[in-house]
Amino acid sequence: MSPSLKVAGAALVVVAGLVLWSGGPDKATSTAQRWMAQLKSDSSASIKPATQAAPTKAPGAGGPAVVSVSKPLVRPVTEWDEYTGRFDATDAVEIRTRVSGFLVDIHFKDGQQVKKGDKLYTLDSRPFDRALDQARAELSQAITKVESTTLDVERGKPLMDRKIMSEKVFDDRANALREAQSAVKTSEAKVKTAELDVSSTVIAAPFAGRISRSNVPIGAWISAGAVANSTLLTTVVTEDPIHLYFDVNENNWLKYRRLAEQGKEAGVARLGSKVELALPDEKGFPTKGTIDFVDNRLDLATGTMRARAIVENKAALYSAGMFARVRVQGSEAYEAVMVPDDIIGTDQTTRFVLTVAEDGTVGRKTVTLGPITNGLRVIKQGLTAEDVVVVKGLQRARPGSKVAAKEEQIRVAQTQVAVPAGALLPAAAAAGAATTPSAMPATAPAAAATSSKKK
């Protein structure tokens, strides 16, 4: 007896025992006879009880897998590069004094707006007034001496001509006159210095802006001298306009230079280029700025180029030291092929998408990725507007297999496409961008319906 018959016999004995337990010997004997007859007639040596029904297949289980497909979206797109910037005042100064003295008055409130020339502090000027009076007295004395020595020289000239006065005496009188004249100039300089010291006891705002708090109270001693030793009274900064500094990496800087060489308006390599910015709590980029400075060399430590934009700040919303998101136009408007980012597969260093031919055959195309715009990934190379890509059911699609394609619309997070004002676009593309309302799903071109046929 073959091993399969031995196994079948053992199984028959077990079944017969169960039947015997449930229905008695007579029923067990009849059941065993039926199984033996079936076993002898089964050429495959498989045991299938006569009363057991054969399993049935689920409807469509043997047909091709069903996947959702769509043509890529084609929309006008402008690439943007984002950076992190920091605001800084166009003018900022530390208020210090050039003379030492006691502070006698403060003429502002902490944090207020000041105008150019407004008085900020007043120091005790009495010591400097006395020094000014002394300098003026010395000047008057020097002038009197000049007048006296001038008369001596004039009287000595005829005496020297008649040989009554020696040349030595006359030369001494002339030298005394010159010394007196020099003393006058020295005294005049002392007077001007004393006047400057007196004027320095009143400290005024150098330009219009917002002043900080006062660091010293009335009655405190204010020290003058070098920055390290002098007393910092307060600071004044301008608020409108305000500067925004940000760093551009080397690769993007090279791209901007190429765009500038081609005469395009994108990038920041050209002064006057436009940028957009937003605070951390703002959506989109509602504020505009203009590039007014680009550094003359890359930072060797970071490999970045420092750029600066000037921004209007009439509402005083921006303050020096605040962070902002900066967006720079990285390209001019162009027609882009876009697909959902989650349908892009990765194979080590390559990226690919699955496509479906007209006969339902799945293919694979290697693609080069661009930025994400309106929630969709821009495909730089490898995909055309006529290709049909798999958007759902990727796990059921394998290259070379057959699938049943079902059309589905591609939806985007937002439909507002960033296109610079005045950009020249094809009429159909411009109309599509202008007529797609916000929060409305964008669909593939109508021609996509012709490439997918129901199986």
Image (tube, helix red, strand yellow):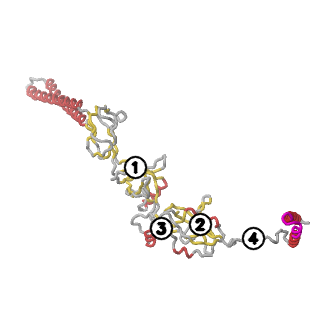
First reached walking from the N terminus: tag 1 or tag 4:
4
Q: Quadrant of residue 286?
A: bottom left
Foreground of the two, 39 or 244 = 39
The residue pinned by badge 3 equals 440
Q: Quadrant of residue 66?
A: bottom right
Q: CA distance from mark 2 to mark 4?
A: 31 Å
Foreground of the two, 120 or 257 = 120
Mark 4 neighbour class, 10 Å CA radius: few under 14, some 14 to 19, many 20 or more? few
**Residue 18 percent location from the top left of the image:** 84, 63
Q: Are marks 3 and 1 in contact (CB under 8 Å)?
A: no
Mark 2 neighbour class, 10 Å CA radius: few under 14, some 14 to 19, many 20 or more? some
Q: Label 2 is placed on what type of residue? A: Lys
The residue pinned by badge 4 equals 55
Q: Label 1 is placed on what type of residue? A: Phe
First reached walking from the N terminus: tag 2 or tag 3:
2
Q: CA distance from mark 3 to mark 1?
A: 37 Å
First reached walking from the N terminus: tag 2 or tag 1:
1
Q: Nearer the viewer, mark 1 or mark 4?
A: 4
Give the SS element for disc 3: loop
Q: CA distance from mark 2 to mark 1?
A: 45 Å
Main SS type for the magenta part? helix
The residue pinned by badge 1 equals 87
Is 28 covered by the magenta stretch?
yes
**Magenta region, residue range:** 20-30
